[in-house]
Amino acid sequence: MSRDDRNKTGLIFNIQKFSVNDGPGIRTVVFFKGCPLHCRWCSNPESQLHRTQILWNQKKCRNCRHCAEVCPLKAISLLNGHVHINPGKCSGCKECISSCPGKALELEGEYRTVQDVMDVVLQDQVFYEESGGGLTLSGGEVLSQPEFAMELLSAAKDKGLNTCCETTGFSAPEIFDRVTGQVDYLLFDMKHWDPSKHKEGTGVTNELPLLNMKHAIERGQTVLPRIPVIPGFNNTLEDASCFAGTLHGIGAARCQLLPFHQFGENKYSLLDMDYDYQDIPSLHREDLQDYLKILIDSGIDAFF
């Protein structure tokens, strides 16, 4: 990898070490910022915009108005004790963060070079070797920053690391092929089997993701479709049956079910965003046994 390649930058919002749920073995997960989907239940709403954002913690706020006073672009306003940050105006200059006496503001998202990220990833190389783990790229959507993703994957391969990618598959096929061609293991989100329902829940239809998933399977890649089971969206037994038919249609023999959870609920208030699934109870494995059975009885190796 050349010096220019090492200095290529991408926008990420987290690097999570010692993950055991995002591919085989112990892994380091790099979360990309920016996603073409806007899932109504998204557990990482800070991942959606391809730009830095300021988070506001109401519990730490002293209502001093200093952030609004120092903002050079007047992107901050206060109403009824709430700080509102206009993402269309905010430049991410961090003047408000550095001047906040209560430390109620923090920046979400930063530009990092390939070398910066790899320096963190390689700190745990011994654990990857012992467990069969490696590097996982997640998001957001990895395919929204294809050049950065490809350089990271190339750097990982140069070090002999196993590579994994968690993706929605929503990209032009040529970009999908270029990026995923360097991936050992694909975790493929499958939101809905029906195009119109998929668009209702995510903002886009599912034809492109299904096309890319089918192509990846046909060229012999290791692909694990993962279905987030969401109340009121895709959690009926009819949905389970239709998912099974769709999986068979693209040549997939297995899938993982991801029961709906509320781990990301607090992030919406920090981002001053509405959350459509506020107070909706989480699902648990015992709630989805019939759902699981339908998939298994249909010949799909389904599991949690």
Image: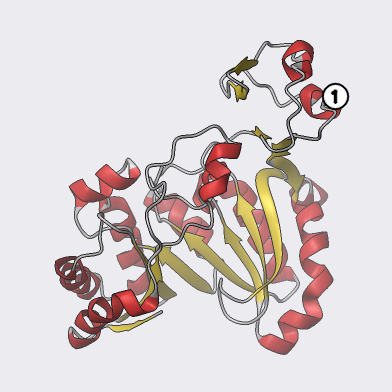
For the point 24% across and 85% down, which residue is it? 296
Asked if residue 30 is positioned above or below residue 96 in the image, the reply reads: below
For the point 21% across and 71% down, which residue is it? 240
Asked if residue 253 is positioned above or below residue 261 in the image, the reply reads: below
Where residue 67 sits in the image (x, y, percent)? 75, 19
- Mark 1 Cα-neighbour bin, 10 Å: few <14, some 14–19, many ≥20: some
Residues 107 and 183: in front is 107
Asked if residue 217 is positioned above or below residue 41 in the image, the reply reads: below
Residue 145: tell me if it is visible.
Answer: no
Q: Is residue 303 left or right of residue 243?
A: right
Asked if residue 250 is positioned above or below residue 207 in the image, the reply reads: below
For the point 80% across and 62% down, which residue is it? 120
Amino acid type of the residue tagged 1 in the rendering: Ser
Residue 65: tell me if it is visible.
Answer: yes
Q: Residue under circle 1? A: 99
Residues 1 and 191: in front is 191
- Position of the N terminus, as image quadrant, is bottom right
- Position of the C terminus, as image quadrant, is bottom left
Where residue 117 sits in the image (x, y, percent)? 76, 56
Q: Is residue 89 left or right of residue 281?
A: right
Residues 178 and 59: in front is 59
Residue 69: name its quadrant.
Answer: top right
The kind of secondary structure element at disc 1 is: helix
Where residue 46 sits in the image (x, y, percent)? 57, 43
Residue 10: name its quadrant.
Answer: top right
